[in-house]
Image (cartoon, helix red, strand yellow):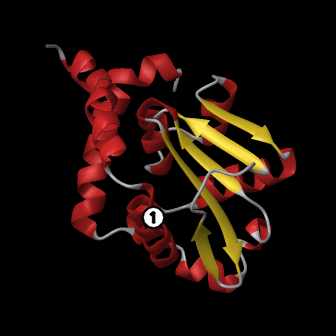
């Protein structure tokens, strides 16, 4: 199996595993992790644009959706699917490239690898926020390096399909 096929097969491996994990665990874990990672942004008011709004982050290729809102000084992961104010959707590889700064969100958006539906202004705030995240300062160094290497690998293997240059 060549490396491009291997990279493309990752979602087929993750999708069934994702289906075995109860949503309450995914919601609980994502809520705790996001509140930890974005503690400073929440306290500084940088995420106030999410207050009272429902944002869906959809990872299409692994069939995972997170419904998030800001209540008080906490990001909350909603327990059941609801109608979001905005939906940001993409495949996992494009999101990983975005998170690790290999591709900017505008490139993904204009190449239809990052879709935004619903409240355009809210989607723009979310896209701009994602673009400012410095993941190297958010994650423990070892985890950052693993993700960075993996995103380099994906960029090398799939970058031409995302039209990154």
Describe the element under mark 1 as helix, strand or loop.
helix
Tell me the quarter of the image containing the N terminus. Answer: top left
Residues packed near mark 1 inside 10 Å, few (<14), some (14 to 19) or many (20 plus): some
- Residue 67 position within the rendered picture, expressed as x and y whole percent measured from the top left: 61, 56
**Residue 152 in the figure: left or right of residue 41:** left
**In which image quadrant can residue 76 be found?**
bottom right
In the depicted structure, whether residue 8 falls above or below residue 16? above
The image position of residue 158, as x and y in percent, is 38, 22
- Choose top left, top right, bottom left or bottom right for residue 120: top right
Identify which residue, 97 or 9, lies in the foreground: 9
Indicate left or right for 123 with 24 as reference: right
Rendered residue at 69%/55% (across/down): 55
Q: Say if 159 sits above or below 152 in the image.
A: above
Q: Is residue 133 left or right of residue 155?
A: right
Which x, y percent locates residue 23?
44, 56
Task: Check disc 1 and report the residue beneath it.
Answer: 30
Q: Residue at x 57, y 82 (%)?
A: 40
């Amino acid at each position: 199996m060549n490396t491009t096929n291997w990279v493309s097969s990752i979602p087929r491996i993750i999708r069934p595993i994702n289906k075995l994990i109860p949503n309450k665990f995914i919601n609980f874990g994502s809520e705790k992790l996001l509140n930890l990672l974005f503690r400073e942004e929440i306290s500084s008011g940088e995420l106030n644009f999410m207050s009272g709004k429902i944002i869906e982050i959809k990872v299409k290729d692994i069939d995972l959706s997170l419904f998030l809102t800001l209540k008080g000084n906490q990001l909350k992961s909603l327990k059941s699917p609801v109608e979001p104010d905005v939906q940001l959707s993409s495949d996992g590889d494009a999101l990983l490239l975005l998170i690790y700064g290999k591709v900017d969100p505008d490139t993904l958006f204009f190449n239809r690898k990052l879709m935004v539906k619903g409240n355009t202004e809210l989607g723009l705030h979310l896209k701009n926020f994602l673009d400012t995240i410095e993941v190297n300062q958010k994650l423990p160094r070892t985890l950052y390096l693993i993700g960075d290497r993996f995103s380099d690998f994906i960029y090398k293997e799939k970058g031409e399909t995302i039209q990154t240059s």
